[in-house]
Amino acid sequence: MTVPGPAALVGGPQRGRAVLDGGTETIHDGGHGGCPYSSGRLERMRQVKRRRGWTAAVAAVLITVPLILVMAPPAGAAPAVCASSSHPALAARISQDILAAQRGRISGVAVAVDDPGVGLSCRLDSTAQFYSASVVKVTILGALLRKAQEQRRFLTSSENALAWAMITRSDNNAASALWADDGRFWLQHFLNLAGMTHTVLGPGGVWGLTLITASDETLLLRLLLKPNTVLSTASRNYALNLMAHVIPSQRWGVPAGAPASLTVHVKNGWLPLATHGWHVHSIGAFTGPGGGYSIVVLTLDNPTMAYGIATIEAIARVINRDLNPAATARVPSSRVSPTWETPDEQIPALSR
């Protein structure tokens, strides 16, 4: 099977531009061999493309890539999304609620939930690869922190300022600077140490076209939440603090429905492409009494950014509710921000 690479996604063999979160990023000729399909929903996405008239767009530039196929459950059986040996009833309830929350949505969705406190793990198409958009900025930060650890030094004032801008307001220029400063060696070194084996770095300087999976993003969040040999306690606390200070207009997504008593550490990404519409993602860790868990929701085939956010928040609300049934005050659903759908900065073209 052939699918379009990034060059096709942004307008064929000529050089195109893809809007990336708050800016634009040049996609160079030749593309990247990634496949942003949700692996358990290939046929549904073909139907979505036909309904929305996108079939013609995929003929511009084609590359052949392998696809990971997932065995479908028996007819009439609901997928086993969540599992917990100690809390099977909770796992069954969250499974049903996740599936119900996405019913009727045209978004392609991957979900991963990790709550060691109750021995709960949820996986829905969690090995499907998606273009990362700005979600990869947490990986860029992790690589920077690991690099500093191995060099036995603190972050420089410049690195600290760039990290703050990159995470708290999703600054693309800061991300590009740190991506270049880390270099592919340190980025890949961090991925290897983290066990993020299904994450593929974007070509050249195009960090927004890194391929990610919900499972790998869960591994990343687990590094931030639990003591480990990859990131020191100081590095983990540093990253979590930045994610806790993301600006209000970018705190949509997985925080929806979380108890107000928890601290939410979030990073989102949003990337519109000519095919598969808006890629809209949200990853988050939740700390405090009753916290210590993470939620990852990756989506594509969204007609607008707001539609993707609504899909993510519908799923996040039921997960947060089921994990915290006694909470009386919760994070409300996001209100549409004037900054949504509208890019407000550009990053320069980057050579391969």
Image (cartoon, rainbow, N blue to C red):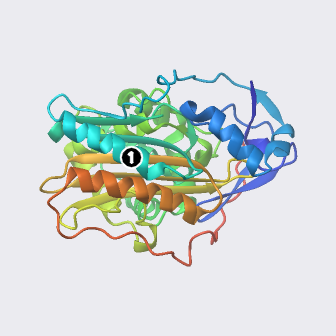
Residue displayed at 37% across by 54% down: 316
Residue 137 percent across, percent down from the top left: 47, 51
Question: As shown in the figure, which amino acid type bears the numbered disc 1?
Answer: Ile
Looking at the image, residue 101 sits to the left or right of residue 86; the answer is right
Looking at the image, residue 144 sits to the left or right of residue 352; the answer is left
Where's the C terminus, which quadrant?
top right
Residue 7 visible here? yes
Q: How crowded is the residue under tag 1: few (<14 C-alpha within 10 Å), some, or many (20+)?
A: many
Q: Is residue 11 above or below residue 147?
A: below
The residue tagged 1 is 98
Residue 314 percent across, percent down from the top left: 42, 58
Residue 127 percent across, percent down from the top left: 48, 30
Residue displayed at 14% across by 53% down: 290
* Residue most extreme to the left: 289
Residue displayed at 38% across by 44% down: 142
Instruction: Indicate the quadrant where residue 129 lies.
Output: top right
Residue 139 percent across, percent down from the top left: 44, 44
* Residue most extreme to the bottom: 338
Residue displayed at 14% across by 31% down: 86
* Residue most extreme to the front: 76
Tally of marks: 1
Residue 28 visible here? no
Instruction: Indicate the quadrant where residue 25 lies.
Output: bottom right
Which residue is nearer to you in this view: 180 or 92? 92
- Label 1: state its secondary structure: helix
Which residue is nearer to you in this view: 226 or 106? 106
